[in-house]
Image (tube, rainbow, N blue to C red):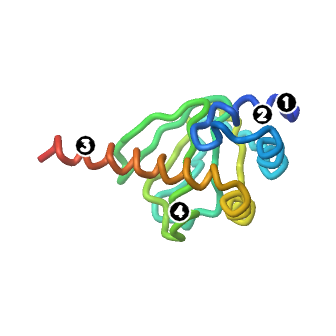
Amino acid sequence: MFLRRSEILDPLRKVPIFSGVSRRHLDLIARLADEVRWDAGKVLARQGERGLEFLLIVDGSARVERDGKIIARLGAGDFFGEMSLIDGKPRTATVIADTPVVLLVIHRRSFDYLLDDVPRIQKRVLVTLCERLREADSTLASIN
Protein backbone atom coordinates (compact mmCIF):
# COMPACT_ATOMS: atom_id res chain seq x y z
CA MET A 1 0.00 0.00 0.00
CA PHE A 2 1.45 3.33 -1.04
CA LEU A 3 0.92 6.64 0.68
CA ARG A 4 -1.32 9.23 -0.96
CA ARG A 5 0.18 12.66 -1.56
CA SER A 6 -1.82 14.07 1.39
CA GLU A 7 -0.30 11.36 3.62
CA ILE A 8 3.17 12.43 2.53
CA LEU A 9 2.61 16.15 3.17
CA ASP A 10 1.79 15.72 6.86
CA PRO A 11 5.09 13.99 7.77
CA LEU A 12 7.00 16.51 5.64
CA ARG A 13 5.48 19.42 7.59
CA LYS A 14 6.79 17.88 10.83
CA VAL A 15 10.39 17.61 9.63
CA PRO A 16 12.43 20.52 11.03
CA ILE A 17 14.18 21.31 7.76
CA PHE A 18 10.84 21.59 5.96
CA SER A 19 9.03 23.59 8.66
CA GLY A 20 7.69 26.88 7.38
CA VAL A 21 7.99 25.80 3.75
CA SER A 22 5.06 26.85 1.56
CA ARG A 23 2.40 24.37 0.42
CA ARG A 24 3.71 24.74 -3.13
CA HIS A 25 7.21 23.73 -2.03
CA LEU A 26 5.88 20.86 0.10
CA ASP A 27 4.06 19.59 -3.01
CA LEU A 28 7.35 19.82 -4.92
CA ILE A 29 9.18 17.87 -2.21
CA ALA A 30 6.44 15.22 -2.20
CA ARG A 31 6.72 14.86 -5.99
CA LEU A 32 10.51 14.47 -5.79
CA ALA A 33 10.42 11.89 -2.97
CA ASP A 34 10.12 8.16 -3.51
CA GLU A 35 8.33 6.02 -0.95
CA VAL A 36 10.36 2.97 0.12
CA ARG A 37 9.42 0.23 2.59
CA TRP A 38 11.97 -2.02 4.31
CA ASP A 39 11.77 -4.84 6.81
CA ALA A 40 13.36 -4.78 10.27
CA GLY A 41 17.07 -5.52 10.12
CA LYS A 42 17.62 -3.82 6.76
CA VAL A 43 20.68 -1.53 6.55
CA LEU A 44 19.35 1.82 5.34
CA ALA A 45 22.73 3.56 5.16
CA ARG A 46 26.21 2.14 5.71
CA GLN A 47 29.12 3.90 7.43
CA GLY A 48 31.97 4.59 5.02
CA GLU A 49 29.85 4.34 1.86
CA ARG A 50 29.07 7.27 -0.38
CA GLY A 51 25.65 8.73 0.30
CA LEU A 52 23.35 9.16 -2.65
CA GLU A 53 20.11 10.11 -0.93
CA PHE A 54 18.37 11.94 1.89
CA LEU A 55 16.05 9.68 3.88
CA LEU A 56 13.07 10.62 6.06
CA ILE A 57 11.42 8.06 8.33
CA VAL A 58 7.64 8.28 7.92
CA ASP A 59 6.85 5.24 10.04
CA GLY A 60 8.90 2.80 12.09
CA SER A 61 12.18 3.10 13.94
CA ALA A 62 15.89 2.67 13.31
CA ARG A 63 19.16 2.77 15.19
CA VAL A 64 22.28 4.67 14.28
CA GLU A 65 25.58 2.87 14.80
CA ARG A 66 29.13 4.14 14.52
CA ASP A 67 31.87 1.53 14.54
CA GLY A 68 29.32 -1.03 15.77
CA LYS A 69 28.14 1.04 18.78
CA ILE A 70 24.61 2.42 18.95
CA ILE A 71 24.82 6.22 19.13
CA ALA A 72 21.21 7.23 18.45
CA ARG A 73 17.68 6.02 17.80
CA LEU A 74 15.44 7.42 15.09
CA GLY A 75 11.69 7.42 14.61
CA ALA A 76 8.96 8.98 12.51
CA GLY A 77 9.97 12.49 11.43
CA ASP A 78 13.70 11.89 11.82
CA PHE A 79 15.98 12.07 8.82
CA PHE A 80 19.53 11.26 7.80
CA GLY A 81 21.83 11.34 4.81
CA GLU A 82 22.04 15.10 4.31
CA MET A 83 25.67 15.46 5.39
CA SER A 84 27.03 13.07 2.78
CA LEU A 85 24.93 14.73 0.09
CA ILE A 86 26.20 18.17 1.00
CA ASP A 87 29.93 17.45 1.33
CA GLY A 88 30.24 14.39 -0.91
CA LYS A 89 32.11 12.47 1.76
CA PRO A 90 31.29 8.93 2.98
CA ARG A 91 28.52 8.34 5.48
CA THR A 92 29.60 8.77 9.11
CA ALA A 93 27.32 6.07 10.53
CA THR A 94 25.25 3.02 9.71
CA VAL A 95 21.46 3.21 10.07
CA ILE A 96 19.57 -0.06 10.56
CA ALA A 97 15.78 -0.52 10.66
CA ASP A 98 14.68 -1.83 14.08
CA THR A 99 11.11 -2.30 12.87
CA PRO A 100 9.56 -2.32 9.42
CA VAL A 101 9.99 1.25 8.11
CA VAL A 102 8.38 3.51 5.57
CA LEU A 103 10.83 6.05 4.19
CA LEU A 104 10.65 8.99 1.86
CA VAL A 105 13.84 9.07 -0.20
CA ILE A 106 15.10 12.13 -2.04
CA HIS A 107 17.99 11.39 -4.38
CA ARG A 108 21.04 13.62 -4.76
CA ARG A 109 19.95 15.50 -7.87
CA SER A 110 16.53 16.29 -6.40
CA PHE A 111 18.03 17.26 -3.03
CA ASP A 112 20.44 19.65 -4.78
CA TYR A 113 17.52 21.10 -6.73
CA LEU A 114 15.57 21.67 -3.50
CA LEU A 115 18.54 23.41 -1.87
CA ASP A 116 18.86 25.69 -4.90
CA ASP A 117 15.14 26.32 -5.39
CA VAL A 118 13.86 26.58 -1.80
CA PRO A 119 16.10 28.97 0.18
CA ARG A 120 14.30 28.25 3.47
CA ILE A 121 15.50 24.64 3.24
CA GLN A 122 19.11 25.82 2.91
CA LYS A 123 18.90 27.64 6.22
CA ARG A 124 17.09 24.80 7.99
CA VAL A 125 19.72 22.29 6.81
CA LEU A 126 22.45 24.57 8.17
CA VAL A 127 20.65 24.91 11.50
CA THR A 128 20.20 21.13 11.75
CA LEU A 129 23.88 20.53 10.98
CA CYS A 130 24.86 23.07 13.64
CA GLU A 131 22.60 21.36 16.19
CA ARG A 132 24.17 18.00 15.42
CA LEU A 133 27.67 19.46 15.65
CA ARG A 134 26.90 21.06 19.03
CA GLU A 135 25.45 17.80 20.32
CA ALA A 136 28.55 15.89 19.19
CA ASP A 137 30.78 18.54 20.77
CA SER A 138 28.84 18.29 24.03
CA THR A 139 29.14 14.50 24.00
CA LEU A 140 32.90 14.73 23.45
CA ALA A 141 33.25 17.27 26.23
CA SER A 142 31.42 15.00 28.68
CA ILE A 143 33.72 12.10 27.80
CA ASN A 144 36.90 14.08 28.52
- Give whichever of 52, 113 is nearer the camera: 113
Of the image marks 1 and 3, the number of the one nearer the N terminus: 1
Residue at the image point whose x is 34% and y is 45% from the top: 69
Q: Quadrant of residue 71?
A: top left
**Mark 3 and mark 4: Cα distance apart in space:** 21 Å
**Mark 4 and mark 1: Cα distance apart in space:** 29 Å
**Mark 2 and mark 1: Cα distance apart in space:** 5 Å
Q: Position of residue 76 (x, y in %)?
A: 61, 30
In this picture, is 24 found above or below 109? above
Q: Quadrant of residue 86?
A: bottom right
Query: Helix or strand or loop: what does disc 4 sit on?
Result: helix
Residue under numbered circle 1: 6
* Badge 2 vs badge 4, beta-carbon distance below 8 Å: no
Residue at the image point whose x is 43% and y is 58% from the top: 92
Residue ranking furthest to the bottom = 88
- Give whichever of 135, 103 is nearer the camera: 135
* Badge 2 vs badge 3, beta-carbon distance below 8 Å: no
Q: Position of residue 97 (x, y in %)?
A: 57, 38
Residue under numbered circle 3: 139
In this picture, is 36 found above or below 2? below
Residue at the image point whose x is 41% and y is 38% from the top: 72
For the N terminus, give its image quadrant: top right
Q: Position of residue 22 (x, y in %)?
A: 75, 40
